[in-house]
């Protein structure tokens, strides 16, 4: 029996995050971000000012086949903002198949890829247009917008990877916070609420 071979996909990626050839998209709005920011009072103040439908980030994806060996390619557009002393960020995740890697390439804006391993290693890698971060398997990761305009990245990962979004919440957040400071306008500091990743 011959396997069905999917058609190739031609994609056009805009600096604004628009992706011609996308097969799906989703948005995370302010009402979806409860528990993401350490300063819940600051989050609730922004929520009260802007309402639950305020757009935080949008993802467009192209996937034409699922399973081992296939790729998901997409764009993530993270709006700027501040929540207390934290910059706007995505929920972040570890892949459900933890050994799966991911690539992020910056199309526009400036941001930071915040990464850490379950055993305590931590990195904060700055990204600007033309730069990419290769996130190896077994690294928890999230995007942070440290600029004043949308932070737009292209991403690519294995279609069988899946995501574990609850892992960060169970750990009390990631071990580092990205905050305004320093020569580049941002720095990291330890998150005192982080309790590690029990059961991993």
Image: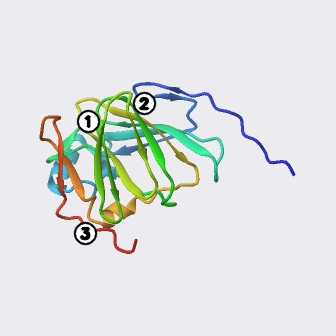
- Assign a secondary structure to mark 1: loop
Q: Earlier in the sequence, mark 1 or mark 3?
A: 1
**Mark nearer the viewer, 1 or 3:** 3
The picture places residue 181, in percent across and down from the top left corner, at 12, 41
Q: For the C terminus, which image quadrant? A: bottom left
> Mark 1 Cα within 10 Å, few/some/many (few <14, many 20+)?
many
Identify the disc placed on residue 17: 2
**Up/down of 44 relative to 133, above or below:** below
**Up/down of 177 relative to 80, above or below:** below
The picture places residue 110, in percent across and down from the top left corner, at 28, 32
Q: Residue at x 19, y 52 (%)?
A: 44
Tell me how far mark 1 sits from mark 3, CA to CA.
28 Å
Q: Earlier in the sequence, mark 1 or mark 2?
A: 2
Q: Note whether residue 10 is visible.
A: yes
Question: In this view of the protein, which residue sits in the foreground, 40 or 176?
Answer: 176
| Marks 2 & 3, CB-CB < 8 Å contact | no
When asked about the image quadrant of residue 122, the answer is: bottom left
Residue extending farthest right: 1
Q: Earlier in the sequence, mark 2 or mark 3?
A: 2
Q: Which residue is mark 1?
A: 80
Identify the disc placed on residue 180: none
Q: Which residue is mark 3?
A: 195
Q: Residue at x 37, y 63 (%)?
A: 167
């Amino acid at each position: 029996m011959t396997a069905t071979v999917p058609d190739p996909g031609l994609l056009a990626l805009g600096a604004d995050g628009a992706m011609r050839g996308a097969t799906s998209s989703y948005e995370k709005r302010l009402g979806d971000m409860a528990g993401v920011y350490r300063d819940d009072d600051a989050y609730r103040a922004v929520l009260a000012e802007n309402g639950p439908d305020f757009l935080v980030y949008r993802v467009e994806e192209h996937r034409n086949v699922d399973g081992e060996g296939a790729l998901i390619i997409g764009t993530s557009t993270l709006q700027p903002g501040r929540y207390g002393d934290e910059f706007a960020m995505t929920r972040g995740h570890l892949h459900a198949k933890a050994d799966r890697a991911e690539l992020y390439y910056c199309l526009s804006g400036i941001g930071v890829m915040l990464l850490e391993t379950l055993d305590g290693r931590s990195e904060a890698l700055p990204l600007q247009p033309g730069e990419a971060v290769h996130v190896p398997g077994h690294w928890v990761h999230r995007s942070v917008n440290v600029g004043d305009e949308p932070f737009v990245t292209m991403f690519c990962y294995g279609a069988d990877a899946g995501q574990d979004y609850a892992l960060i919440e169970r750990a009390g957040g990631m071990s580092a916070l990205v905050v305004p400071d320093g020569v580049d306008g941002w720095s990291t500091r330890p998150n005192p609420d982080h309790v590690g990743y029990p059961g991993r």
